[in-house]
Image (spheres, rainbow, N blue to C red):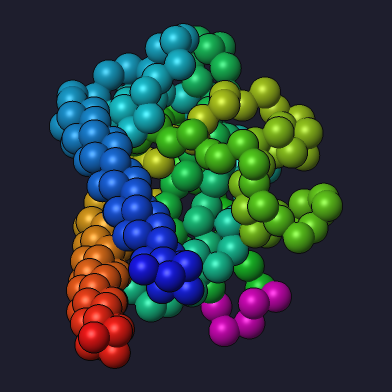
Amino acid sequence: MTAARLVPLLAGGLVVVLTVQLGNWQVGRALEKSAMQAKFESVAASQAVPLGLAPPAEWQSVELRGAWRTEGSILLDNRVHQGRVGYHVLSPLELAGGRGWVLVNRGWVAAGADRSRLPAIGAPPGEVTLSGRIRYPADDVFTLAKEPAPGRVWQVLDLVRYRDWADLPVAGFVVLQTGGPDDGLIRDWPRPDAGVDRHRGYALQWYSLAALAAGLTGWYAWNGLRRTKRDHHNAARRGA
């Protein structure tokens, strides 16, 4: 077989190897995400525990006691609930017994027709008891703005900037409030989707491409062998 006929075979084999490797990588990612999902299910199903001094696990259910400091509240903009645009209300909670500060995502509130008029941020006075789940915000927060807006409306949450803005040493996690005094906020938190099915779908696509490339490469090789045999046969007849 000539070099010109070998090049497509080598290219086809390379495509098969590459697509199989990509499919295997997606399968590996699906297994990792399945383990993450199982961990979430295990932690989420665990009983709520009082928030201690040790860093809690992601999604751990916790119970808190403390007092709100509403002057440190902010609104996270462009949060959607059932097709409506609104805000997430985040307020700092001073833990009872002087055990520090925690920033609590108290829930969702709808935005009004006039976006310049912000919803009122109130909170029950005195000591409150509430429950929630632990979330650790991403460290590499992406934002087009170099500095957060000077007001209470933020696009993304950056705990480092929030500590400077509010002058409060809040903990390095946020509590998604799930229970407590009724304050009119909606706390319908979606369960996290690890994307296992998406990775499996990608793996199937890569394996399908590998099968197609293998089939086309095999067909080309078989056709090339037939052509080579025919050329040899014709050359033998001319030589005779």
- Find out whether residue 115 is within the magenta segment: yes
Q: Is 77 left or right of 12, judged from the image as shown?
A: right
Residue 234 location in percent, x, y? 25, 87
Q: Is residue 101 above or below residue 238?
A: above
Magenta stretch: dominant SS? loop
Instruction: Please tell me which residue is depicted at 55% across the width and 68% down the height of the picture.
Output: 78
Residue 122 location in percent, x, y? 54, 51
Question: Residue 230 falls in which quadrant of the image?
Answer: bottom left
Q: Quadrant of the N terminus?
A: bottom left
Please report the bounds of the magenta region as a residue range.
112-116
Q: Is 46 left or right of 68, judged from the image as shown?
A: left
Instruction: Please tell me which residue is depicted at 43% across the width and 70% down the height of the picture.
Output: 2
Q: Is 184 left or right of 172, judged from the image as shown?
A: left
Residue 42 location in percent, x, y? 18, 29
Q: Does the rendering let one see residue 96?
A: yes
Number of numbered discs:
0
Q: Is residue 224 above or below residue 76?
A: below
Q: Does the rendering let one see residue 131?
A: no
Instruction: Please tell me which residue is depicted at 46% across the width and 9% down the height of the picture.
Output: 53
Question: Residue 190 falls in which quadrant of the image?
Answer: bottom left
Q: Quadrant of the C terminus?
A: bottom left
Residue 214 location in percent, x, y? 25, 66
- Find out whether residue 145 is within the magenta segment: no
